[in-house]
Amino acid sequence: DLRIFSNIADAEQRHMDALLDQAASLGIDTTAIQEPSSGVYINTTIQALSDSLLSIGSVSSNAAIEVGILIEETDIQDLTDSIATSTDVLLIGVYENLLSGSLNHLNAFESAL
């Protein structure tokens, strides 16, 4: 029931839309990564991770926020790595925008804790 989660879920959807738009403009087929519904993943490793984090985060509000922090820290590292290895200027710009969003989300989660 914490508002932070609905706000960040909305932002994450905008992030996904931005990446899908960028992929489309680069001619990248994204059908294999588009999932059927929230919380359901084709990739079994991601599904297991999602299930585990959901279980951990369901214990309490603080546990949910701690899972949010873990996810944002992971996203920040992944985006930083992607920026460092990408050669596409437009994609780097999208990654940098996503990184900024993840830093904001991390700050919001840490403030809520």
Image: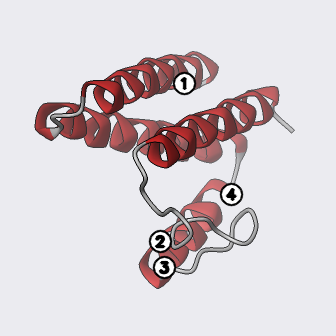
Nearest to the eye among marks 1 and 3: give it.
3
Picture layout, residue 25 above or below residue 34: above
Q: Which mark is residue 105?
A: 1
Given residues 44 and 113, the one toward you in this image is: 44
Given residues 15 and 18, the one toward you in this image is: 18
Q: Which mark is residue 43?
A: 3
Given residues 103 and 13, the one toward you in this image is: 13
Q: Earlier in the sequence, mark 4 or mark 1?
A: 4
Nearest to the eye among marks 4 and 3: give it.
3
Residue found 43% across the figure and 43% down from its top: 70
What kind of residue is marked 2? Ile
Q: Quadrant for residue 83, please give it.
A: top left
What kind of residue is marked 1? His
68 vs 4, left or right, is: left
Q: Earlier in the sequence, mark 1 or mark 3?
A: 3
Cα–Cα span, label 1 and label 3: 25 Å
Q: Earlier in the sequence, mark 2 or mark 4?
A: 2
- Residue 15 position within the rendered picture, expressed as x and y whole percent measured from the top left: 57, 35
87 vs 49, left or right, is: left
